[in-house]
Image (spheres, rainbow, N blue to C red):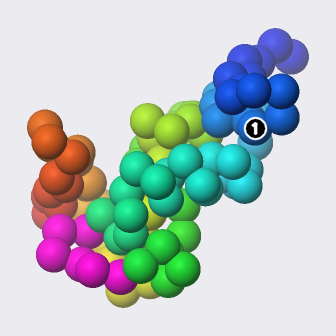
Amino acid sequence: HIGRVLVRGKREVLDLGRQVRVATPAQRRAVIARDSGCVWPHCKRPPAMCEVHHLVAWQHGGDSNLDNLALLCGPPHPRVHQGWKLLQLHGGEWDARAP
């Protein structure tokens, strides 16, 4: 089995491809720095109330890399598992599209 690993410095893993499903602590810190809290439109919950979520589900082929990870809090999280799509727009804004 061959996979890729992207690191920052010697120890911070930022991209694991399909090696593992759960975000590493370094990935979580990077996603927090980028997103600053829940990315669901108009949600203001802080990172402490959020989980790192795969935009393309891991079980559907989504990688564990920063481009496929975003912070989501509890209330909107079930929506993405019901078919809603999160899209990052230019300028860092996010949009949620109904199924």
Q: Amino acid at mark 1?
A: Glu
Magenta region includes residue 17:
no
Q: Residue 74 or 97: which is nearer the viewer?
A: 74
For this view, does 55 lie left or right of residue 57?
left
Residue at horizontal 69 percent and vertical 28 percent from the top: 8
Image height check: is 83 above or below 79? above
In the current view of this chain or complex, which residue is farthest to the top?
2
For this view, does 82 lie left or right of residue 7?
left
Chief SS of the magenta region: loop
Split into 4 quadrants, where in the image is the C terminus? bottom left
Q: Residue 62 or 94: which is nearer the viewer?
A: 94
Image height check: is 35 above or below 21? below
Q: Which residues are magenta?
A: 40-45
Q: Position of residue 45 (x, y in %)?
A: 35, 82
Q: Answer with the quarter of the image where residue 5 lies.
A: top right
Residue at horizontal 26 percent and vertical 54 percent from the top: 86
Q: Answer with the quarter of the image where residue 52 lies.
A: bottom right
Badge 1 element: strand
Q: Residue 66 or 81: which is nearer the viewer?
A: 66
Residue labelled with disc 1 = 12
Q: Position of residue 22 (x, y in %)?
A: 70, 54
Q: Residues within 10 Å of mark 1 (few under 14, many from 20)?
A: some
Q: Position of residue 39 (x, y in %)?
A: 30, 64
Split into 4 quadrants, where in the image is the N terminus? top right
Magenta region includes residue 43:
yes
Image height check: is 44 above or below 38? below
